[in-house]
Image: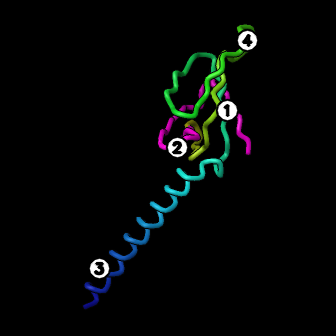
Amino acid sequence: MGVLLAFAIFWDTERIARATGEAFAQDILVYPWQLVAVTVYSEKRLELAVPGVTESELRPDSAYHFRYTGLRLLEGTHDRYVLLGENGGNIVVLKDEQGLRFEFSR
């Protein structure tokens, strides 16, 4: 009986976690502006084909030649950023390396 009870608790915990995670993901897709806005500056063209992301070419004499706006921060680690396009659905992972600069704002 104890094994059956433990299994039932485990099963319900998994179902609650799944439902909570799906609700959280849906909330992010519907309201992406609740996440931190990210502007990416790059020496090279990144060719991000993400709806809602705007690429602007900067002056040739500047340190960075391209600016990308319309991204939101989902997760950051010590050397990578997981970014979401403001129109939702598309995710981009960029490595924090030389030649890229990230600016974060509300």
Magenta stretch in the rendered image: 81-106
What residue is pinned by disc 4?
59
Q: Residues within 10 Å of mark 4 (few under 14, many from 20)?
A: few
- Between disc 4 and disc 3, whose residue precedes? 3
Which residue is painted at 36% across and 80% down in the image?
9
Measured Cα–Cα span from mark 1 to mark 2 = 16 Å
Q: Nearer the viewer, mark 3 or mark 1?
A: 1
Q: Amino acid at mark 1?
A: Thr
Q: How many numbered circles are shown?
A: 4
- Image-based side of 84 in relation to 18, left or right: right
What residue is pinned by disc 2?
88
Measured Cα–Cα span from mark 4 to mark 3 = 62 Å
- Between disc 4 and disc 1, whose residue precedes? 1
- Between disc 1 and disc 2, whose residue precedes? 1
Where residue 7 is drawn, which disc sits there? Answer: 3
Q: Nearer the viewer, mark 1 or mark 2?
A: 2
What residue is pinned by disc 1?
39
Q: Residues within 10 Å of mark 3 (few under 14, many from 20)?
A: few
